[in-house]
Image: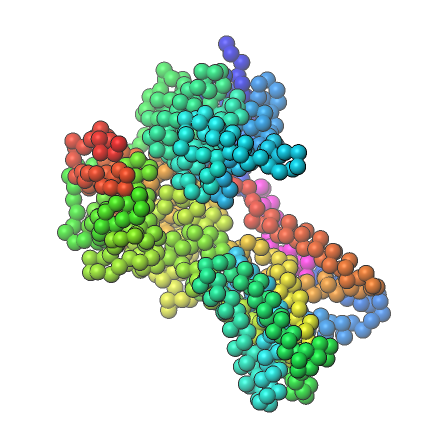
Amino acid sequence: MKEPILQLKHICKQFGSVIALQDVSMDVYPGEIRGLIGENGSGKSTISSIAAGMQKANSGEMNFKGQPWKPVSMIDALDHGVGMIVQESGTIAGISVAENIFLGELDAFRGKAGIINRGEMNRQADRAMQAIGVSHVKGAMPLASLDFQTRKLVEIAKVNMKHPDILVIDETSTALSHDGREIMYDLMRKYAEEGHAVIFISHDLDEIMEVCDTLTVLRDGILIRTFSKEEFDEDEIRTSMIGRELQGDYYRSDTCASRQEEEALIGEHLCLGEELKDVSITLHKGEIVGVGGLSSCGMHTLGKVLFGAVRPETGSVHTPDGREIRNEETAIAEGIGYVSKDRDIESLCLSASIRDNIAIAGMDKYALGGFLITSGQEKKYVNRQVKELSIKCASAQQLTSQLSGGNKQKVVFGKWIGCGSEILLLDCPTRGVDIGVKQAMYQLMIGLKKEGKSILLISEEMSELIGMSDRIMVMKDGKVTKELERSTELTDAVMIRYMI
Amino acid sequence: MEAGSEKTKQLLITLLPVLALAVLFILFCTFVKAKGYRLDIYLKTIFNQGVVLAVVATGAIFIYTLGSFDISLGAATLFAATVGVLTYNATENFPLMILAIFGTAVACSLFSSILASAFHIPAFVTTVAMLSVLSAVSAQIITTKGGALGGIGIPKTLVKPLDNPPFKITLLAIFFLVCFFVFQLTKIGRRQKFIGGNPVCARLTGIPYNKYAIIAFTMAGIGVGLGAFLTLVYTPSVTTTTASGIGMNIFVAIVFGGMPISGGARSRIHAALIGGFSYILLNNILELALEGSSAYGITQIVSAVFFLAVVCVTSMNYRTDLLPR
């Protein structure tokens, strides 16, 4: 019997009045890929971040390689053998790839005259990227020029360079395309083969069952059960996660496309560099249009262009009666709401409360005379969204930064639904969201469709697109390669044919 | 239990600026008494200095809320007062002088924001340029028309009837209430806080930065105009050093008042009022305590240390533990 490489004993953690972990004990063994799964706010990120030195437990103890483990910071933990790739952005945009990779270690490249040898640093960064199988990203590149998924790869390269004994990957796969995920899986397998351990957090049950050897389920800060590979059972794991059997439909139950005749939003001949090449799209009332493809296919840019946040070089976005969407202001005036893939940066003000975030888009709805804000009206407006979307929070005054990923996303939905958006442009709306919240969001989208609202669903999850869309536009290299109507015949394989 | 102590901590941090103001006031009175000076005269000085700083800072809160700052506010105060004096001396028309002061102050402020908007540069960059330009132009006018030391002025009798606390308190109260209303109870203040919290998200929520920056600079301009007018009421002459430190003092004062330096959702309009008077009290206490040739330098160093301590304590209010996603 192997000795555990990491032992967590009776770990408890509280954030103010919120109990994040209650007496959690867990052993991780060398050569093991341990999955951590649970609903948003279940404590899986908290437990792994404590092990990786991001924060301290209120009580309990840890042992790493048989010794007491008390990392003072993430850098300290990484230096001693526990590295973590965080869920949200863990890089700094204003500096180069190499500077990100060697952040805090620039002195290693300082010559006798005190000048940093950038050439050598860039070369080593190139090698670090190549080590994870990414050769198109160079150390000298400014990080700001890379998309979200490539930045994640930079983070992976940075942690991998230290070759930690325990690699913690927190909900990273949703930020990665198919290729990016393969890179990550290969790395995980390599670590396990070399006798290191991997702690892998994901909401994707299929993925976690595929790549993990053991699976620990957390719920409301309590360790519910650890499954060995042979015990893996989808229904049983789901029930452990949410504490009940998942009732009702997950995706849409109807199998035919349906939409109203009336058009809601039209994008014509949209071109923008390599990202959009003559893309035209018409969104009807009561319709969910899916847009799928590889992460770099241009679909995320399409969402921004339709919202007026990015101007196309040629082509236009307009309403059926010809009013042009020139910018975000005109888009919102036309009843369009946009949920960004990069939730923490583009969709929420984390330093503000839930109330501030939900209220900000809907002030015109409750402000007296169009400008006077009364606390009572605002509270009523916000509390309705909190209640209808079942946002788990201490109160509407709680900071959004203190919420779990799924609840943050609900706040974003509340912001746009509350103000009565008729058209919702949703870019990866279920990214980093647990199965229970996902189901709630799908049901919400179905409800909105029934109300005659139009939804553009941009997603990297094919099952989501197939399950929810009336029609799917498949994109590749900035072009729409195929438009597929909702049908029972539609499968991942059909979509992949037009994506790659 | 934990929740209770967290709430108490938050309440204490929120009340800290008020408590600090009270402590500074008691300290100040103690020092003046201990030195054998007349407290009523010293309190009058504190009031006159504090009211100008508080008024200008109240307007400036709108800029700071956006996560920006304006270093040229002192120079703009000087310039507006200078233009006011020139206008009165040329026309002998008091209402026109007031109009000239406010017009100049708002124009200076707006010019900074429009320049920033036109050239797509951060507003504070243009305010640095404005600081130099306005100081130089004012100095040129003052030295040409009246000499660097004596400066230029208006007849004392003209503003004497206004140089009393009730008038100044009324002006400060009206301006504060207007700002409070705009900041707390209208869409303008809410949106400005949101921009300060996350400008990217604000843009994607349909909040145009330029529009709200122009409103913020306009409010700051009104504050500068009021500050320039109150300066003239107190000392009816303008020299090259009039209001010279206000730009930097506002920055410190606002932080003393409990406002985060980064602006955003936790911005508070009353920070200007509390911080303005706290800063003036602190400066005067230090001057009383450190009388002598090296007093100025030591005062500045002690102020800086105090400033850092306040930033550290007030930032505890928003630098809280985060639940990992």
Magenta highlight range:
B1-21
Magenta-colored stretch includes residue B17: yes
Q: How is the image coloured?
A: rainbow
Magenta-colored stretch includes residue A483: no
Task: Give the side of residue A420 with respect to residue B194, left or right.
Answer: left
Quadrant for residue A366, please give it. bottom left
Residue at (53% x, 40% y) in the render: A15
Residue at (64% x, 55% y) in the render: B16
Quadrant for residue A34, please give it. top left
Task: Give the side of residue B156 with respect to residue B227, left or right.
Answer: right
Task: Give the side of residue A386 with respect to residue B175, left or right.
Answer: left
Relative to B15, residue A256 above or below: above
Q: Position of residue A295 (x, y in %)?
A: 33, 37
Task: Give the side of residue A205 with respect to residue A218, left or right.
Answer: left
Residue at (25% x, 34% y) in the render: A499
Residue A468 at least partly seen: no
Q: What residue occupies the far top of the structure in this picture? A: A1
Residue A135 at least partly seen: yes
**Which quadrant, please, contains the C terminus of chain A?**
top left
Q: Position of residue A475 (x, y in %)?
A: 25, 39
Q: How many marks?
A: 0
Front position in the image: B86 or A73: B86
Q: What residue occupies the far bottom of the structure in this picture? A: B92
Relative to A339, residue A24 above or below: above
Front position in the image: A31 or A397: A31
